[in-house]
Image (cartoon, rainbow, N blue to C red):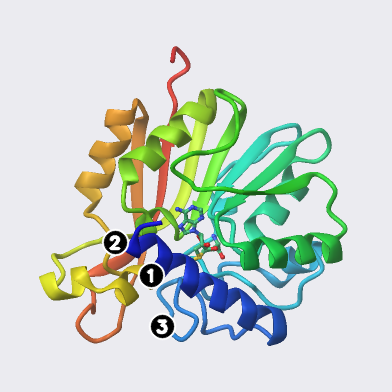
Amino acid sequence: MSDVKEAVRSRYAGVARQLAVLQPDPSAGCCQADGPDCGCTGSYSADELKEIGLTESVSLGCGNPTMIAQLEPGQVVLDLGSGAGLDVLLSARRVAPGGHAYGLDMTDEMLQLANDHKAKAGVANATFLKGSIDNVPLPDASVDVVISNCVINLAEDKAAVIKEAFRVLRPGGLFAVADMVELEALDPDLKQRLDAWAGCISGTIPIDEYRATLLAAGFADADFQVHATETIPGVDGKVGSAYIRARKPTGK
Ligand SMILES: C[S@@+](CC[C@H](N)C(=O)[O-])C[C@H]1O[C@@H](n2cnc3c(N)ncnc32)[C@H](O)[C@@H]1O
């Protein structure tokens, strides 16, 4: 495993252990268990959380991708980097009856937590898979909607992740993702820091580069909506949370 990937895995193993024993801290979202709010607080309503047996959000994300995913009964959904399972369990409710939600994560502690949340929620149509988002263990054209929440920025090879999303989507399928993006160039020293990478800062890329990567993979209609910006010193306003949507063309 590369140094970057190990830094990410070990950070989220630690966060999962904290979440397993502590009441989640509502200020702990957006990748940073000890970090700032960059737009995710309030992304989930109390009613949504109640649907899956939670009273507090266990999100480490930077938005709520289920809000932009237009999920319908019968669909198959895949969440890249599913963490504690919140978006997978909400998606599973939305695609029932007849649909299924998959979560993919590389961190054992997160998979354990997600399965605990699944059991508490009493959700049957969800499965958590172990694996890396640049090598998805699902067949070609088997998914209707790919979601993800604050994860693709953590990947070293974002093109490989986006190609995998394209591969597993059926023609006409939707990519509906919340992610962090670089709005202004960050300090080159900060870009090298593993802790800042694992904290969803240093691995961010500009919107133009993200869009070009989606188009190069074959996606169409790529759309970006920035809905919040980071406020931590040195990063203030330079990194933002975006909702990103793109479509796999029907002819591909
Ligand atoms: C910032 S957390 C977000 C978790 C979840 N999406 C949420 O919104 O709460 C990042 C998650 O992505 C997982 N992750 C990061 N890189 C990954 C990779 N290359 N393959 C699989 N999982 C990955 C981590 O283990 C962690 O659970």
What is the spatial separation of the Cα atoms under label 3 and label 2, in whole angstroms?
17 Å
Task: Count neighbours of disc 2 (C-alpha within 10 A) and say few if under 14, some if 14 to 19, many if 20 or more.
Answer: many
Q: Residue at x 40, y 48 (%)?
A: 244
Name the residue beneath numbered marker 3: 36
Observer-nearest of 160 and 39: 160
Name the residue beneath numbered marker 1: 198
What is the spatial separation of the Cα atoms under label 3 and label 1, in whole angstroms?
14 Å
- Horizontally, residue 242 falls left or right of residue 65, namely left
Circle 2 — which element?
A: loop
Q: Amino acid at mark 2?
A: Gly
Name the residue beneath numbered marker 2: 203
Q: Residue at x 56, y 77 (%)?
A: 15
Q: Residue 249, located in which quarter of the rendered image?
A: top left
Q: Position of residue 144 (x, y in %)?
A: 60, 31
Earlier in the chain: of badge 2 and badge 1, it is 1
Earlier in the chain: of badge 3 and badge 2, it is 3
Q: Position of residue 201 (x, y in %)?
A: 30, 69
Observer-nearest of 35 and 91: 35
Q: Amino acid at mark 3?
A: Pro
State the residue lying farthest toward the top.
Answer: 251
Residue 127 visible in the current orientation:
yes
